[in-house]
Image (cartoon, grey):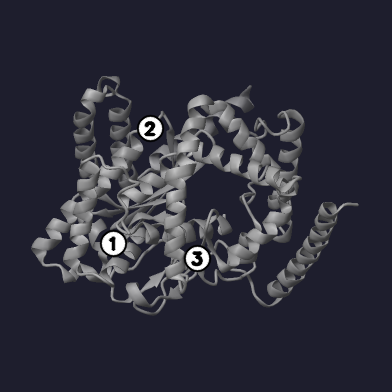
C-alpha cells in the first residue's frame, strides 16, 4: 500500500466520522428545534429597514409574511443577506483577485474553448460532471432526511450513468417523480444550514469564490465526496476540476459581466446575491 | 365514451377556470412581456444596424409597465429623503437608464425561451406574480412585484431569490455610508457613461 492510498483511506475514515457526527448533531438539533424551512418567519429588523416606511407583504418567493407587531417586518432571507462581514478587507482583496482571474484567465480560456467546441458537447460535459457529483447530493439529502428526494436522485444517477453514456446525456431530466420532491441540488453547507446552523460570517476564497463560515465547512466535506478529488496523481485532480470550471464558465459567459456592469458596488452586489441564492437553495 | 366525454368536460372547466383566474396585474405583466418578446424576435429588427431602434422600442415598452420611481424610492429606502425633489427626479432618470441599458444587453441574447405564469396574489394595491423562464438546462424562477397606480406597474423583480430592489438597497446603503448622496448619483451616471463608450467591464471596476 503506497502513501497516497493510505491518505485516501484515512480521508474516508475521517469522512465517515464526520458524517456520523453530522447525523448525530442533526438529530440532536432537530429534537429541541423545529427547523423553520419553507415557512417565512417574521423577524425584527434593525439597520436599514427600520426607518423605512414600506412593509413588504411577501417574501422573495411570494410567501405571505404574517403581520406582527413592530414597525418593519421582513423575510428571513433578509436576515441571511445581513450576514456579518468582519473580514471585508480580505474579502474585497480576494474579490479583486477572483475578478482578475476571471477576466484574464478563465474567460479567455472559456472563449477559446467554446470557439472550438460547439455548445451541445459542452452541455454533455456539464451533464457528466453534474452526474459525477451524485455522492454530494445523495449524502446531503440523506442527512437532511429527505429520503424521497434521495431515492429520486439515486435513480437519476443510475439511469444517466447506465443509459446516458456514463452521464454525458441527461436522459432522466424530463421524467418527473410521481409526487413533488424537494430540490435535489443540495450540498453539505446547505445541510448544515437546513439543521439550523447560521452562516457565521461572509468569506471570499481565492479561486473558489464567495462563501461563508458555514459553507466553508460544508465545502471541506464536499471535497471528500467529490470523485475527482481522488484522481491520482494530484495534478490530474486539479486539471480535471479546472476543465470542469472552464466548461461551466463557457456555458455562462456574460452572467458575471452583467452583474458587474449593473452594480455601483459589485462586491456588495455579489455578496447579497450569493447569500440570497444560497438561502433560497436551502429552502427549495 | 361517456366517461371520456365527462372527463373532457371537466378538463375544459379547469382550463377555462385557470385562464379566467388571471387578474388584472398578471394581464398587464403578460402584455408587457409579450411585447418585449415580440420586439426581440422580430426578424426585421435583428440586423446590427437596427440595434439602436430596437433598444429604443424596448425602452418604450419597459417604461409602460415599470414604475421606476417606486423602484428607486424603495432601493434608496431611508436615504430617499436625503435628495431634494429635483435630485430625486434626476436619480430616477439616471438609475432607470442604467437598469435599462444593462438589462437590455442581458435580454438581447433571448433565444425563444418560454415564460410560464405560475401564480398571482393580490393584496390591496400590490400584487406578487410568480413566473418561470424555461432555459436549455434549467428553469429560472422570476417573480414580479407590482403596485397599482393608474395602472398596475412592476416595481421589483426577484430572480432566483435575489430581489433587484434589495440588492441595490444593500449597495446604496454601503456607498452612502462612506460617500455623499451626490457621489452616489455621479457613480450611477459614470456607470452609464462607461457603458455608452463601450468600455470593457474588465476596466470598469466599481471598486
Depth check: B155 or A46 in front?
A46
User: Which quarter shows the C terminus of chain A?
Assistant: bottom right
Q: In which quarter of the image is residue B109?
A: top left
Q: Is residue B168 left or right of residue B120?
A: left
Depth check: B184 or B78 in front?
B184
Q: Seen from this angle, which residue lies furthest left?
A: B86
How packed mark 2 is, by other alpha carbons closer than 10 Å (few <14, some 14-19, many 20 or more), is few
Q: Is mark 3 on a helix, strand or loop?
A: loop
Q: Is residue A133 visible?
A: no
Where is residue A104 drawn, in percent x and y? 43, 44
Residue position marked by numbered label 2 in the rendering: B110
Residue position marked by numbered label 1 in the rendering: B75
Above or below for B202 versus B79: above
Where is residue A238 drawn, in percent x and y? 65, 46
Above or below for A231 versus A281: above
Q: Seen from this angle, which residue lies furthest top?
A: B44
Residue position marked by numbered label 3 in the rendering: A40
Where is residue A87 drawn, in percent x and y? 47, 71
Q: In which quarter of the image is residue A22?
A: bottom right
- Label 1 or label 3, whichever lies nearer to me, is 1
For the residues labelled 1 and 3, the Cα–Cα distance comes to: 22 Å
Q: In which quarter of the image is residue A3?
A: bottom right
Amino acid at each position: 500500500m503506497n502513501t497516497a492510498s493510505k491518505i485516501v483511506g484515512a480521508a474516508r475514515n475521517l469522512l465517515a466520522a464526520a458524517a456520523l457526527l453530522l447525523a448525530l448533531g442533526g438529530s440532536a438539533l432537530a429534537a429541541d428545534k423545529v427547523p423553520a424551512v419553507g415557512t417565512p418567519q417574521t423577524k425584527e429588523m434593525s439597520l436599514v429597514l427600520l426607518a423605512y416606511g414600506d412593509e413588504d407583504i411577501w417574501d422573495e418567493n411570494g410567501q405571505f409574511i404574517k403581520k406582527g407587531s413592530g414597525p418593519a417586518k421582513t423575510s428571513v432571507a433578509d436576515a441571511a443577506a445581513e450576514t456579518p462581514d468582519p473580514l471585508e478587507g480580505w474579502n474585497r482583496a480576494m474579490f479583486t483577485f477572483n475578478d482578475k482571474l476571471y477576466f484574464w484567465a478563465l474567460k479567455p480560456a472559456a472563449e477559446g474553448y467554446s470557439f472550438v467546441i460547439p455548445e451541445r458537447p459542452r452541455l454533455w460535459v456539464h451533464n457528466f460532471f453534474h452526474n459525477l457529483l451524485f455522492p454530494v447530493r445523495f449524502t446531503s439529502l440523506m442527512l437532511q432526511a429527505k429520503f424521497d428526494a434521495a431515492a429520486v436522485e439515486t435513480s437519476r444517477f443510475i439511469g444517466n450513468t447506465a443509459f446516458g453514456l456514463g452521464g454525458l446525456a441527461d436522459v432522466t431530466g424530463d421524467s418527473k417523480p410521481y409526487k413533488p420532491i424537494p430540490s435535489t441540488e443540495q450540498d453539505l453547507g446547505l445541510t448544515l444550514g437546513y439543521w439550523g446552523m447560521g452562516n457565521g460570517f461572509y468569506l471570499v476564497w481565492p479561486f473558489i469564490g464567495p462563501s461563508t463560515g458555514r459553507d466553508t465547512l460544508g465545502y471541506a466535506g464536499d471535497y471528500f465526496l467529490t470523485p475527482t478529488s481522488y484522481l491520482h496523481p494530484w495534478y490530474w485532480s486539479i486539471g480535471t476540476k479546472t476543465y470542469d470550471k472552464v466548461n461551466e464558465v463557457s456555458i455562462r459567459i456574460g452572467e458575471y459581466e452583467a452583474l458587474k456592469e449593473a452594480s455601483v458596488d459589485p462586491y456588495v452586489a455579489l455578496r447579497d446575491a450569493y447569500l440570497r441564492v444560497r438561502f433560497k437553495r436551502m429552502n427549495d | 365514451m361517456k366517461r371520456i366525454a365527462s372527463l373532457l368536460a371537466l378538463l375544459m372547466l379547469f382550463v377555462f377556470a385557470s385562464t379566467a383566474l388571471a387578474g388584472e396585474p398578471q394581464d398587464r405583466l403578460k402584455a408587457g412581456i409579450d411585447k418585449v418578446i415580440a420586439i426581440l424576435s422580430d426578424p426585421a429588427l435583428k440586423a446590427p444596424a437596427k440595434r439602436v431602434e430596437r433598444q429604443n422600442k424596448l425602452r418604450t415598452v419597459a417604461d409602460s409597465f415599470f414604475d421606476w420611481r417606486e423602484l428607486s424610492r424603495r432601493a434608496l429606502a431611508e436615504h430617499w429623503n436625503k435628495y431634494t425633489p429635483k435630485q430625486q427626479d434626476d436619480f430616477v432618470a439616471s438609475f432607470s437608464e442604467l437598469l435599462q441599458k444593462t438589462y437590455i444587453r442581458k435580454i438581447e441574447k433571448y433565444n425563444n425561451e418560454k415564460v410560464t405564469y405560475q401564480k398571482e396574489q393580490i393584496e390591496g394595491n400590490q400584487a406578487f406574480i410568480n413566473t418561470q423562464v424555461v432555459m436549455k438546462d434549467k428553469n429560472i424562477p422570476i417573480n414580479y412585484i407590482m403596485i397599482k397606480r393608474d395602472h398596475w406597474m412592476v416595481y421589483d423583480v426577484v430572480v432566483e431569490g435575489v430581489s433587484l430592489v434589495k440588492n441595490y438597497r444593500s449597495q446604496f446603503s454601503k456607498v452612502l455610508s462612506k460617500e455623499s448622496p451626490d457621489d452616489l448619483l455621479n457613480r450611477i451616471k459614470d456607470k452609464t457613461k462607461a457603458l455608452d463608450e463601450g468600455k470593457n467591464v474588465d476596466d470598469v471596476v466599481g471598486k
